[in-house]
Amino acid sequence: MWVRFPPLAPPIVKMKSGQTVDSCFSTDFLIAEADEWRSECWKMIRERSDLHFIFLTKCIERFIECIPADWNDRYHGMENASSTDKDFFDRGIKNLIL
């Protein structure tokens, strides 16, 4: 007798409040190519404001144009790490982060 099982689906894992979500470790959250889907990411981040989100970027100069309008009100659990060269830093990005 053969028993047929339904196909396996990947488990849905709900992260627990307070956990950290490391995002975009294989890409860059602020690259222009991400503009079309970044709003969906902001929506998910808003919905899970109980989590701590970290994203990496080398395009920190795009930060102000990429953040949502309600940035100051809703995104307290966000953290950004940026890697850039000294010349870029000296050209004015230091004014954004200092």
Image (cartoon, rainbow, N blue to C red):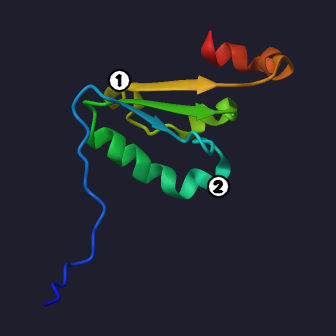
Side (left or right) of 59 relative to 79: right
* Disc 1 to disc 2, C-alpha distance: 25 Å
Identify the secondary structure beneath mark 2.
Answer: helix
* Quarter of the image where the N terminus is located: bottom left
What crowding class fits label 1: few (fewer than 14 Cα within 10 Å), some (14-19), or many (20 or more)?
A: some
| Image quarter hosting the C terminus | top right
Q: As shown in the figure, which amino acid type bears the numbered disc 2?
A: Glu
* Residue positioned 42% across, 48% down in the render: 41
Q: Residues within 10 Å of mark 2 (few under 14, many from 20)?
A: few
Q: Is residue 74 above or below residue 29?
A: above
Q: Quadrant of residue 92?
A: top right
Q: Which residue type does callout 1 highlight? A: His
Q: Give the residue at mark 1.
A: 76
Where does residue 90 sit, x and y in percent of width and height? 82, 14
Q: Circle 2 sits on which residue?
A: 33
Figure quadrant of residue 27: top right
Relative side of 77 to 18, left or right: right
Residue drawn at the location 55% of the way across and 40% of the way down: 66
Q: Name the mark on residue 58.
A: none
**Above or below, 92 relative to 41:** above
Residue nearer the viewer, 2 or 95: 2
Rendered location of residue 82, percent (x, y): 64, 25
